[in-house]
Image (cartoon, grey):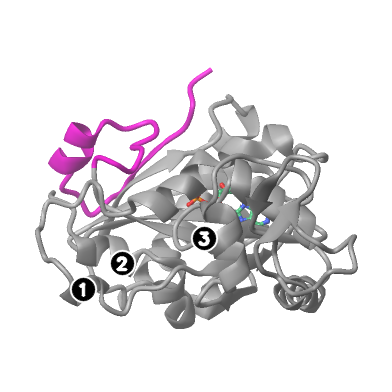
């Protein structure tokens, strides 16, 4: 189960979203990522005022900070407008991510303590504070064993993804492991025990099997997808490589590798 650059690239949001648009909540992909946003994210340190939306300056270039005598990249008015318009298009609240990662490790910095962003500043603050996002930027292929220099990543670009926010009940989130194009294992994602899940789980599993069958166009035969069950529908949330770098949740990877079944195993957090 060696991870290759191709596996990682296939899991970028922009690689799978166009194929599976109907199976996943609405999103917009700004690709390449607006340049001043990339500059802002790439500079060291977090500072407030990463955006210049509360100022009249709009050239978007590196500006002098008189008080500290340092130069800081600010996000241009043009790029801020693009983000603001996109948020509006998606109904007013979004969850941001880069090619692979959502800044879910940075909730501590968000005024709402959630991924729900209603303006560009919320988005910039979360992305900037996240180590997961920093990993997307710094070394997304660090676990890849292949040595294909150039070629595969020649046309690579960073992307800013804005997904329409919706209220999620984390008890209904599952991680699903597909091996040889067959769903073999399903794990509850929330680490808490929910008694109602025991009753609902068989129906959830049916919905997840149906969803997995609709993903046959995914280029790899082994992959891991995250799903959310709302009422009688399973929504695709994310796709990850079938790799040790992807958390097996309630399964160990050696267990998953050994599973060879037509009846996927669903595991819930025990009482
Ligand atoms: P990652 O690949 O970094 O895990 P995900 O896209 O899987 O990012 O999202 C991480 C978590 O964020 C999800 O498990 C879910 O709880 C929450 N989330 C994702 N998308 C949305 C959304 N559109 N609205 C509300 N919460 C979301």
Q: Which mark is residue 167?
A: none
- Judged by its main secondary structure, the magenta piece is loop
Q: Is residue 261 visible?
A: yes
Quadrant in the picture for residue 76: bottom right
Mark 3 or 2, nearer chain start: 2
Q: Secondary structure at mark 3?
A: loop
Assess disc 1: are there few (<14), some (14-19) or many (≥20) residues with their C-alpha within 10 Å of its C-alpha.
few
Q: Is residue 247 magenta?
A: yes
Q: Which residue is label 1 attached to?
A: 152
Mark 1 or 3, nearer chain start: 3
In the rendered structure, the answer to whether residue 166 lies left or right of residue 185 reads right
Quadrant in the picture for residue 231: bottom right
In the rendered structure, the answer to whether residue 38 lies left or right of residue 47 reads left
Range covered by the magenta-colored residues: 244-271
**Badges 2 and 1: C-beta atoms under 8 Å apart?**
yes
Point 62% across, 38% down: residue: 106
Assess disc 3: are there few (<14), some (14-19) or many (≥20) residues with their C-alpha within 10 Å of its C-alpha.
many
Q: Which residue is label 2 attached to?
A: 9
Quadrant in the picture for residue 130: top right
Residue 4 position within the rendered picture, expressed as x and y whole percent measured from the top left: 17, 58
Q: Is residue 221 visible?
A: no
Q: Which residue is label 3 attached to?
A: 98
In the rendered structure, the answer to whether residue 72 lies left or right of residue 2 reads right
Vertical side of 174 occupied by 215: above or below: below
In the rendered structure, the answer to whether residue 114 lies left or right of residue 102 reads right
Q: Secondary structure at mark 2?
A: helix
């Amino acid at each position: 189960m060696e991870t290759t650059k191709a596996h990682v690239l296939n899991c970028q949001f922009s690689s799978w979203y166009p194929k599976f648009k109907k199976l996943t909540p609405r999103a917009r992909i700004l690709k390449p990522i607006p340049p001043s946003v990339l500059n802002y994210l790439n500079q060291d340190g977090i500072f407030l005022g990463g955006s210049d939306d509360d100022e009249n300056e709009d050239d978007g270039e590196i500006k002098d900070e008189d008080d500290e005598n340092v130069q800081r990249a600010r996000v241009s008015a043009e790029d801020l407008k693009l983000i603001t318009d996109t948020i509006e298009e998606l109904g007013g609240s979004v969850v941001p991510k880069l090619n692979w990662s959502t800044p879910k490790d940075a909730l501590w910095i968000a005024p709402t303590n959630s991924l729900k962003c209603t303006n560009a500043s919320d988005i910039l603050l979360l992305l900037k504070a996240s180590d997961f996002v920093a990993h997307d930027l710094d070394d997304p292929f660090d676990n890849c064993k292949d040595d294909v220099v150039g070629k595969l990543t020649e046309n690579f670009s960073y992307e800013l993804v804005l997904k329409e926010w919706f209220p999620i009940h984390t008890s209904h989130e599952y991680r699903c492991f597909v091996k040889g194009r067959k769903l073999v294992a399903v794990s509850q994602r929330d680490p808490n025990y929910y008694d109602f899940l025991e009753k609902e789980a068989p129906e959830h599993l049916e919905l997840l099997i149906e969803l997995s069958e609709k993903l046959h166009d995914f280029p790899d035969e082994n992959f891991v997808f995250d799903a959310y069950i709302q009422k009688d529908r399973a929504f695709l949330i994310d796709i990850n490589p079938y790799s040790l770098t992807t958390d097996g949740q309630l399964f160990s990877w050696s267990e998953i590798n050994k599973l060879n079944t037509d009846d996927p195993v669903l595991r819930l957090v025990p009482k």
